[in-house]
Every structure is written in C-alpha cells, then in structure tokens.
Image: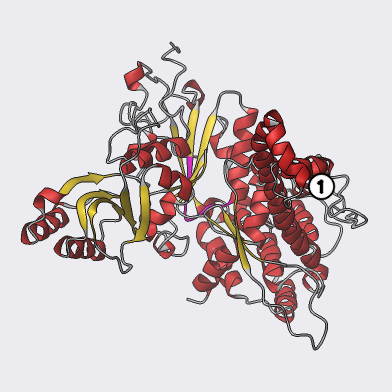
Amino acid sequence: APSPLTTSNMAASIREKQTVALKRMLNFNAPPLKNTAAEPVWKVLIYDRFGQDIISPLLSVKELRDMGITLHLLLHSDRDPIPDVPAIYFVMPTEENIDRICQDLRNQLYESYYLNFISAISRSKLEDIASAALAANAVSQVTKVFDQYLNFITLEDDMFILCHQNKELISYHGNTHKKPSLTNSLFTGDNISAGQFSFQRPLFVLADRNVDMATPLHHTWTYQALIHDVLDFHLNRVMMEEGAGAEPSPAGARPKKKNRKSYDLTAADKFWQKHKGSPFPEVAESVQEELDAYRAQEDEVKRLKSIMGLEGEDEGAISMLSDNTAKLTSAVSSLPELLEKKRLIDLHTNVATAVLDHIKSRKLDVYFEYEEKLMSKSTLDKSLLDIISDPDAGTPEDKMRLFLIYYITAQQAPSESDLEQYKKGLLDAGCDLSPLNYIKQWKAFTKMAATPANYGNSGVKPMGLFSRVMNTGSQFVMEGVKNLVLKQHVSRIVSPETDDYRYFDPKMLRGSESSIPRNKNPFQEAIVFVVGGGNYIEYQNLVDYAKSKQGKKVVYGCSELFSSAQFIKQLSQLGQK
C-alpha cells in the first residue's frame, strides 16, 4: 500500500473527481457497476444551462447514452410526458427552476424524480417541492433529493472556472460572490476507504485580479491561449466559419454562405494534450509533421477501405472479404484508428490555419514581442507610437491592449503632453479610450507604482518571430522559435520565497500569524484561485511551474475565464461610469 504520507486525497485530478461525481449521479447516486455487461437503466436527464455547461466538457453524448440517458433536455424547454421512465434532474436551486419542477410533478411527466441540485438548496425551497409533491399526489415518486456541490466547470485536469452563465455576477466588473463551492469535489477524502490518508494539507492561494492587470491584456504565443484570444472558444469548443480566412470573393461575385463548424478540443486528443501549451510556431511545425506522416499512410487507408469493400463493389474486394479473414480483422481494427487520426489532423490544420491568419493579418508577433519587452523592462527597438499609428498592425483593440500594458507597467507615468499625443494616435486608430480612463483610476487608487517591477524577464529572444513564415509548398513552416519561453508571473505567488502576502493557517495559534516561516510548511498541492477572472496565460505559467517542481501539483481556478476582448469590454464599461 502507498505510504500515507505521500498519498493525497487530491491524487485524482479535479476532472476525474467531477466526472466520477456526475457518473454516480447519473446512476441514481449509487456507484456505477463495474460489470458493464449489465444493461443500464434507461432514464432522461433534465438540466438547466448551468448543468449543461458543467456536463458538456466532461461527458460526451455517447458516454451519456452508455449510462442509459436516452434523452437530455433543458428544464425550461417544452417536454412531453414519458410516464414510464425515471428522470434525473441536475439544476441550480433557483425560484424559477423549483417552480418548473413543481409543474412537472403536477403534470406527472415521469415515473420517478431524482432531484440533484448543483449547489445547496434552502429549507424553504425544499418545503415548496414537498408541498407540490403532496398536492400532485407524487410524494412516492420523488425518490431522492441531493445537494451535489458541483457548482464549477472543469476545463482541464488542473483547471476550473466557477461559472459560464450569468458571468456578470462574478466578473471583474461585478466582483462579488467569491466563494467557490469545492467542498464535495476537491477536499473529500475519496481515498480514505482504501486506507490512504494525507498529512499534507493543500495550500489555497486566493489572488485578486488587481494584483496583475497586464497579463489578461497580453498578446500570447501558446496554442491554447492564442485560440482563446483570436477564435470563438468556450468550454473547450471552438466555433469557426468553414473556409474562415480564405481569400475574399472576387468583386461582384455572390459571397458564399459560410457554415459554422464546431471542434471539440478534448483530453482524448493526444495532439491537443501534447501541444496546447506549446509556442504556436512549434505547433504549426508539428501539425505539418503529422500531416506528412499521415500522407505516408494514405495508401494503407485505401488498401484497408478496399479490403472492407468500402470503395465500390469490385470483385477483388468481395473475394478478399471471403478469402482472407485475418486481413479483414486487421482492417476492421486499424481503419477506425487511422480515420480518427486523420480527423484530428484536419481539426488542428483548420484551427491552426485560422490562428495563423489572425497572426499574419494583425501582426500579432509584433505585439507579443513588444509587450514582452515592456513587461520585462528590455530595450525597445521601435516607438510605441509607430505601432499605434501603423494602419496594417492590428485592430483598434490590439492597439489599446498594447498601450494599456505600457501604461500599467511604466514605472513613471507618461507626461501630460506625451499622454495627449498617445491619446490622439489611439483615437486616430479608431480606439475607444474608456478602458484607459479606468486604468488611470485603478493606478491612482491602488498605488501600484511599485508593482510593475514584479514583471520578470521572460527570456524571450528578441527576434522577428514571424519574419520567416514561408508558405512555400507547405501550410506551415516556422523557424528559429523553438526556445521561446513565456513569462512566469502568477507562479511567483506559489513559490516559497514570496513574503508579501497574508498567510493564514487554521492550526496556528491566534496572533502568531507569522510565527512559523512558510518554508517550514512545504506544500505538495496548491490551488491558486483568481477572483475577478483568469486566463490561459496564467494557467500555462502554473502548469510549467508545477512541471519544474517534481511532485508538486498546482490547480488553477478562477471566477470566470475571459479573453482579452472580454476584459477590455469590462474595463471600458468601468471607464464609462
């Protein structure tokens, strides 16, 4: 048995723990049977938007079907009665939802009702359900009522957000309700039954977005963070227009109707798992390598298809089917794997091409490099005003992001005359100045003059990252950027050298807050939670930090995940007040 000192009750990732909790719920709150040969009980799943957002990144439609979910429907949609089937509800305990559940009971929609509330339900609302069940003569049909404490969305093994719906409640703009409901899923001792106790208590780091306002605005260079920045990426799904980035239609031609296509970037996708944190040029190179490797197997795919009789009813294929069972068996097992490989290559080719189009058309490499230099106090090789006034470099929003990073990280605020010149340049470029109004107030209120020194050197080589993008013969060719290293900022807070943060330990005597130096209490696990919104740059920093510290496990959480565009919008609203 593992040593109790080294085994932790967070050994399973958050993603695994939340998935187990959901599967248990879908099995009527009993552990799913190990014997999968048994036919599952058929049932319907009723969820609200919150429930849908929690389930969709974790369980596919196929997995739901394997668990006996024949139908999954939104609570507030028009639903027909299915009187001989049990229903599992997974909803927030809101007034509106409770009313609708009571209405379902009155309408006798289902055979039995398993009510699972995403967060704890109040006594008075429970009484409302009880009254409705009594009135509808359905008391025996309300089989179980559970508080699930699953009010968070897991996007990665080591990353979660608090919610996706009603984000304004917990955004940077409306910074309220700061308590993640992690009780059930993160800190319950699932492993205790196996005799595995942990004497290592996790470190919980609570950071306010105001600690670092530059990172959410930063143009980034890693694959996942870039997708979130430049494409429509929510809950691990990319929505794209087919043919996005293609040449515009010739003048006078009727524009082609573009179809919206969605791609799920899942944990089962090995390429994604390996490269989501890689610098984009490296990703583009790897996509090209995968494509070349697949092309070498294309003949094999054709051969397998022909063995299986999938390419026309030619006699050769039919005779092969009857003659050579061994070949057919091999084809049946190999072909789906090869076709899945091709699907993933196509997916990443399309997504990476769309990202590359943004980088080239907006000169995002220029922004990334310049911002890195600002944040690491490196020598600047061109003037900020030149980039702002270059009509070919980026959108008004790109220019505003760059300027705000300059303003936030500058050790001395620009003089009034310089500021006026910058403002004129920004206005001429079509920028909305309200985010700057807010950042000026923020800087004055928080007396952050000393903070910019905290932006450390990233080790980025000052070279034209995209000056050598070539489109000759291959879709992506990039050179000279293999050693790109991104800055580490949030991870500083987790490191033991950090002394300027308040430290609380429930096992320390009152009044002796600093009596035990932190490094005497080493941690193996930490949860870093950012109130007011997080981003993929910080997440990647922490992943890299954890990799560099053998045996340490760091989980990143935030009240919401926002792209730079969403953050700028919030600053703009605050600046207009």
Please state the horizontal and vertical placement of residue 364, each as a whole percent of the image. 76, 61
Above or below residue 336? Residue 79 is below
Residue 170 in view of the camera: yes
Please state the horizontal and vertical placement of residue 3, each as a whole percent of the image. 44, 12
Q: Secondary structure at mark 1?
A: helix
Q: Which residue is mark 1?
A: 288
Q: Neighbour class for label 1 at 10 Å: few (<14), some, many (≥20)?
A: some
Above or below residue 483? Residue 519 is above
Looking at the image, which is closer to me, 38 or 180? 38
Looking at the image, which is closer to me, 541 or 196? 196
Q: Is residue 526 left or right of residue 276?
A: left
Residue 459 in view of the camera: no
Amino acid type, callout 1: Gln
Looking at the image, which is closer to me, 343 or 522? 343
Q: Which residues are magenta?
A: 528-535
Asked if residue 531 is among those painted magenta in the image, a careful observer would answer yes
Residue at figure coordinates x 57%, y 32% from the top left: 495
Looking at the image, which is closer to me, 237 or 103? 103
Residue at figure coordinates x 75%, y 77% from the top left: 425
Q: How many marks?
A: 1
Picture quadrant where residue 330 is located: top right
